[in-house]
Image (cartoon, rainbow, N blue to C red):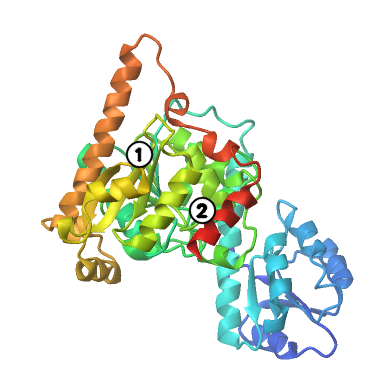
């Protein structure tokens, strides 16, 4: 792999005397990498970095001081720091997690071969190059540009129980809103457990939400434009990052909430957010930030019980803004349960129902062709389009009220209740209570 202008990537290896990585140095040299050599400790590596440009450090857990990840934080804190790729055994996964949190760009589990190593080096290099470009461009400005006078309507789709089809609905709703309103639509994947919106849409991008979260400042429009990808339906997509599922604490407190608020402030139209099922700290932040929460459930007793408990926890019934909306997915009409009976059970009205066609939905996912595009005439798509009309109509009505009551309010004031976040002081309490219900 070559850098721009033909410069080889400079690689330094940290490994213990008894390490099995001696073959790595020889193999990389044979494949035209610029290997600076092998050192046996972090202290020796620091000396090399001070004197020589080191682009990538391959650090094995056997090296002296490698397992103490403070050295990774020290290196990655620098604006132009080196990339760090760690290698470890399966029994050292705790070290791997700490290394990734400290700023390592990737990891390799031993044993690995040259092909695995080369692919990992290429991936972390491109990730580093992209982030360096973003940081350089944004930090070259004397000050951050003022946030434009935009304000998207944000919609989060959430289910307190897995398997309800939340991602399928999020993807298709985003496209339906685009067709219904012709407004700009941004689909954001904040599912940090199973980020797969890009699979549903059959798009490939090395850019992800991780690139924005790692910025140490408020994002601007130019930075946002560089990390989102356009789908052939006309919507823009900020994909999730699958590697986040291996990190116990991917973001700092309030970081994801601030990110969503920044994106919504920059966008003009709709921001549709796919979230993780079940509550974690970052999902709570998303739900507390958006204008509308679509709580997705199914007409099955286990799902309905979890939904009822969640709505009670969120105090959705007491909320008068209308931001909490229950969407009944996979609804089979009156064959199983009637909507009136369901509403009585969960103590909340059902805003919309979406029919069931498991085969059609599965085929669309496997082909990477959303239902709204590939199955436009199906009853399932008609239900999704109806949901998009409902959301767009309510947004128009809100705008009329704000412009006609003589005292216009921001969407934040009119539709963002903070009771869900403030009523329980510690996010752990929320997470644990809901997980107990689910599991």
Q: Position of residue 62 (x, y in %)?
A: 80, 82
Q: Earlier in the sequence, mark 2 or mark 1?
A: 2
Q: Nearer the viewer, residue 256 or 31?
A: 256
Q: CA distance from mark 2 to mark 1?
A: 17 Å
Horizontal placement of 413 versus 96: left or right?
Answer: left
Circles 2 and 1 in contact, beta carbons < 8 Å: no
For marks 2 and 1, give the one nearer the viewer.
1
205 sits left or right of 178 in the view: right
User: Residue 414 at what x, y percent from top left?
Assistant: 43, 25
Residue at point 53%, 47% (across, down): 284
How many discs appear? 2
Taking the spot 58% from the left edge, 50% from the top edge, the residue there is 430
Judging by the rendered image, the residue that carries numbered circle 2 is: 209
Image vertical order of residue 314 relative to residue 100, above or below: above
| Residue count near mark 2 (Cα–Cα under 10 Å), binned few <14, some 14–19, many ≥20 | many
Residue 313 shows in the view: yes
Q: Quadrant of residue 114?
A: bottom right
């Amino acid at each position: 792999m070559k850098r721009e202008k033909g410069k080889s990537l400079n690689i330094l290896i940290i490994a213990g005397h008894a390490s099995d990585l001696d073959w790595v140095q020889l193999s990389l040299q044979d494949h035209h990498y610029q290997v600076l050599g092998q050192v046996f400790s972090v202290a020796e590596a620091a000396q090399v970095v001070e004197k020589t440009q080191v682009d990538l450090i391959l650090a094995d857990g056997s090296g002296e001081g490698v397992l103490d990840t403070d050295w990774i934080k020290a290196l990655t804190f620098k604006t132009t720091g080196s990339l760090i790729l760690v290698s470890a055994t399966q029994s050292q996964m705790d070290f791997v997690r700490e290394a990734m949190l400290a700023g390592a760009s990737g990891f390799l589990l031993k044993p690995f071969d040259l092909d695995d190593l080369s692919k990992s080096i290429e991936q972390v290099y491109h990730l580093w190059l992209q982030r360096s470009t973003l940081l350089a461009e944004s930090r070259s400005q004397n000050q951050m540009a003022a946030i434009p006078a935009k304000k998207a309507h944000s919609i989060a789709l959430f289910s307190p129980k897995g398997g309800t089809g939340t991602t399928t609905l999020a993807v298709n709703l985003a496209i339906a809103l685009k067709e219904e309103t012709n407004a700009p639509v941004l689909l954001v994947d904040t599912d940090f457990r199973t980020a797969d919106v890009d699979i549903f849409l059959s798009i490939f991008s090395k850019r992800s939400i991780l690139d924005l979260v790692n910025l140490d400042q408020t994002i601007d429009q130019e930075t946002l434009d560089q990390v989102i990808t356009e789908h052939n339906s006309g919507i823009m997509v900020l994909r999730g990052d699958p590697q986040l599922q291996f990190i116990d604490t991917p973001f700092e407190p309030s970081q994801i909430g601030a990110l969503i608020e920044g994106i919504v402030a920059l966008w003009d139209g709709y921001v549709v957010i796919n979230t993780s099922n079940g509550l974690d700290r970052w999902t709570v932040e998303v739900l507390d930030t958006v204008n509308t929460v679509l709580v997705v459930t199914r007409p099955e007793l286990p799902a309905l019980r979890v939904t009822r408990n969640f709505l009670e926890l969120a105090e959705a019934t007491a909320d008068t803004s209308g931001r909490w909306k229950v969407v009944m997915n996979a609804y089979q009409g009156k064959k199983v349960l009637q909507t009136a009976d369901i509403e009585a059970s969960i103590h909340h009205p059902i805003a919309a129902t979406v029919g069931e066609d498991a085969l059609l939905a599965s085929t669309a996912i496997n082909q990477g062709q959303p239902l709204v595009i590939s199955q436009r005439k199906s009853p399932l798509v008609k239900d999704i389009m109806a949901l998009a009309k409902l959301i767009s109509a309510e947004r128009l009505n809100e705008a009329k009220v704000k412009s006609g009551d003589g005292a216009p309010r921001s969407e934040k004031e009119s539709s963002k209740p903070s009771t869900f976040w403030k009523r329980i002081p510690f996010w752990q309490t929320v997470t644990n209570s809901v997980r107990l219900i689910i599991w």
